[in-house]
Image (cartoon, rainbow, N blue to C red):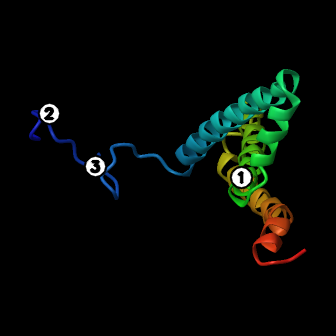
Amino acid sequence: MTSAGAPERSGTTRGGGTLYRGDLGMWSWVAHRITGVLTFFFLFTHVLDTALVRVSPNAYDSVIETYKNPIVNLFEVGLVGAVLYHALNGIRVMLVDFWEKGAKYQRVMLWTVLAIWVVVMIPGFYFMMERTISDLVGGH
């Protein structure tokens, strides 16, 4: 018995003491939900700041000007990464759901999604951060 009075079950912990025995599939599920929520909040914010132009063009310009800093640029890279992962993993989820062999190949498809994500994000990160890094180290 544990201190809370519940009977102890053998094999219910894994590594760090978690009761969930998930694997990479669980983490892909978590990442899919997180990237979906982050994308939703970005779109919500984007609609609000774009609508500001109708209220006051000067206020809109002021808000847009605050976005032109290195921290926001990093957030933009994160946004692109989140949207790309969410889209690629969404295709994988649809294949698992609607392709008769999808469940059999779900792990291979997940590694493919992650490989495509990395291949696209490496040059994406470079091109998105190029101007910011140049500005930070004194370039033109």
Q: Which residue is mark 3?
A: 11
Q: Position of residue 134 (x, y in %)?
A: 82, 73
Residue 74's image quarter?
A: bottom right
Of labels 3 and 2, earlier in sequence is 2
* Residue 91 position (above or below residue 18): above
Q: Secondary structure at mark 1?
A: helix
Three-letter code, disc 2: Ala
* Residue drawn at 67 percent across, 35 percent down: 36
Looking at this rendering, what residue extends furthest in the right direction? Answer: 140
Q: Position of residue 69 (x, y in %)?
A: 74, 57
Q: In the image shown, does 33 or 129 lie closer to the viewer?
A: 129
Q: Which residue is mark 2?
A: 6
Mark carried by residue 72: 1
Three-letter code, disc 1: Val
Q: Is residue 117 visible?
A: yes
Of labels 1 and 2, earlier in sequence is 2
